[in-house]
Amino acid sequence: MTDGRTLDILVVEDNADARATLQMLLELEGHRVRTAESGAQGVERSTAPLDAALIDIGLPDCDGYDVARRIRSTPHGKTAYLVALTGYGQPDDRRRAEAAGFDTHLVKPVDPDALVKMLARRG
């Protein structure tokens, strides 16, 4: 468990195994986690207090860039730490994530230790 404060984290990931793994990892670190399996569900669940959101770029109903823009437009999303999760890591992909409002861009598979340390710095 981290020594930082408990964060309210939203995980938006359509792959059930990846979503469950991220949820388990973050809960073991002491964070409160809610999950969404689609972009629409992610935006809906971002209306509650939110410290961070891990958002898959390749979602079935809309892309993660749109989800990030929509979350940023909510009261809780304005200050949330948004992390793009994607299989694409080229400079153009990173610029696109930043333009959509993401704070960080992580290429899958995500290193669990790096993710935990990154979130600990936020807490």
Image (cartoon, rainbow, N blue to C red):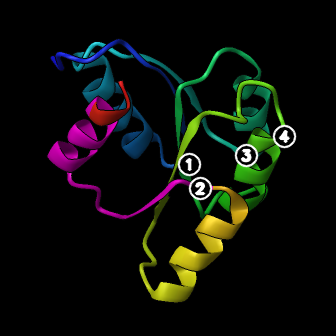
Could you tell whether 37 is left or right of 68 in the image? left
Quadrant housing the C terminus? top left
* 1 and 2 marks in contact (CB < 8 Å): yes
* Dot placed on the residue nearer the N-terminal end, 1 or 4: 1
Number of numbered discs visible in the structure rendering: 4
x then y, percent, for residue 20: 38, 32
Q: Identify the amino acid type marked 3.
A: Gly
Where residue 107 sits, quadrant-wise, is bottom left
Residue 58 position (above or below residue 35): below
Q: Which residue is mark 4?
A: 73
Q: Which residue is mark 3?
A: 39
Q: Identify the amino acid type marked 1.
A: Ile
Q: Which residue is mark 1?
A: 55
* 1 and 4 marks in contact (CB < 8 Å): no
Residue 14 position (above or below residue 95): above
Query: What is the distance, in whole Å, between disc 1 and disc 3 at their CAs?
Result: 9 Å
Query: What is the distance, in whole Å, between disc 1 and disc 4 at their CAs?
Result: 15 Å
Quadrant housing the N terminus? top left
* 4 and 3 marks in contact (CB < 8 Å): no
